[in-house]
Image (spheres, grey):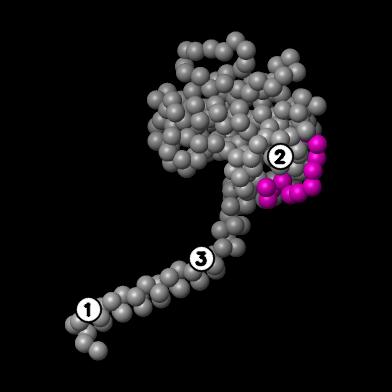
């Protein structure tokens, strides 16, 4: 075959593409278990951060096993249903897109200083991509004990500030119910107030991301309304 001709070039390129694709497929398959393992550990780190525990990848599993005492799924009515909370949590984006009445909602229980806490996951959309988080509630199922948020690609110094300790601390001791009614937590522009619900100041210069957090709280927490009020 003429190595200077177009046919040779096309065949060589095609073979090279196939070989590289096969190698990538084998590599991805070989790393899948490790990737899934890392994702599980990262989720446990985030859950613990909502409890104000700064765990690392090395000690997260040990602390998690000692702190998280139970996990389960609930229905919109607030009743326990069959299924694994951790597995559903890993695909919670799918559940949140469903009507509230048919969602399967994960709940984690923890014990901190002898007192029960409830943790629920949050998923939403920011300016440039997904945002997420966990809210830990005291045993009254209304008062926020701790919160943690993360993002995929929000702007550094602006929307990305949702994953800072300063923003997350604002949620502590806020209430998501009032007078036995679900209210959520409002995220408002600095200087604004809300008379009918607890609120926190949004991120300066990160209006759309702040609105995303506000909407995420309402959408995700509202599915737990009957569980919270029981």
* Label total for image: 3
Q: Residue furthest top?
A: 195
- Tell me, for residue 167, which label it has, or none: none
Q: Is residue 166 above or below residue 57?
A: above
Please name the residue that numbered disc 1 is placed on.
6
- Badge 1 marks a residue whose secondary structure is helix
- Badge 2 marks a residue whose secondary structure is helix
Residue at 44 percent of width and 28 percent of height: 208
Residue 130 in view, yes or no = yes
Please name the residue that numbered disc 2 is placed on.
102
Q: Are marks 3 and 1 in contact (CB under 8 Å)?
A: no
Q: Nearer the viewer, mark 2 or mark 3?
A: 2
Dot 1, how many residues are within 10 Å of its Cα: few (below 14), some (14-19), or many (20+)?
Answer: few
Please name the residue that numbered disc 3 is placed on.
28
Tell whether 29 sits left or right of 204. Answer: right
Residue stretch in magenta: 78-88
In this rendered view, identify the residue nearer to me: 15 or 195.
15
In this rendered view, identify the residue nearer to me: 1 or 84.
1
Dot 2, how many residues are within 10 Å of its Cα: few (below 14), some (14-19), or many (20+)?
Answer: few
């Amino acid at each position: 075959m003429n190595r200077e001709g177009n046919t040779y070039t096309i065949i060589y390129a095609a073979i090279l593409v196939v070989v590289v694709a096969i190698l990538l497929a084998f590599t991805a398959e070989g790393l899948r278990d490790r990737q899934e393992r890392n994702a599980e550990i990262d989720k446990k780190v985030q859950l613990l951060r909502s409890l104000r525990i700064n765990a690392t990848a090395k000690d997260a599993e040990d602390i998690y096993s000692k702190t998280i005492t139970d996990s389960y799924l609930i229905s919109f009515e607030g009743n326990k249903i069959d299924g694994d909370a951790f597995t559903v949590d890993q695909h919670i984006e799918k559940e949140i897109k469903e009507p509230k009445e048919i969602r399967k909602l994960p709940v984690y229980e923890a014990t901190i200083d002898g007192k029960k806490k409830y943790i629920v996951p949050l998923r939403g959309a920011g300016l440039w991509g997904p945002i997420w988080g966990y809210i830990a509630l005291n045993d009254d199922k209304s008062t926020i004990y701790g919160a943690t948020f993360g993002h995929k690609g929000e702007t550094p110094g602006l929307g990305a500030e949702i994953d800072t300790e300063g923003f997350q601390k604002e949620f502590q001791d806020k209430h998501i119910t009032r007078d036995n009614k679900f209210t959520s937590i409002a995220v408002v522009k600095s200087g604004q107030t809300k008379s009918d619900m607890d609120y926190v100041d949004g991120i300066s210069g990160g209006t759309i991301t702040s609105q995303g957090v506000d909407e995420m709280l309402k959408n995700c927490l509202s599915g737990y309304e009957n569980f919270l009020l029981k």
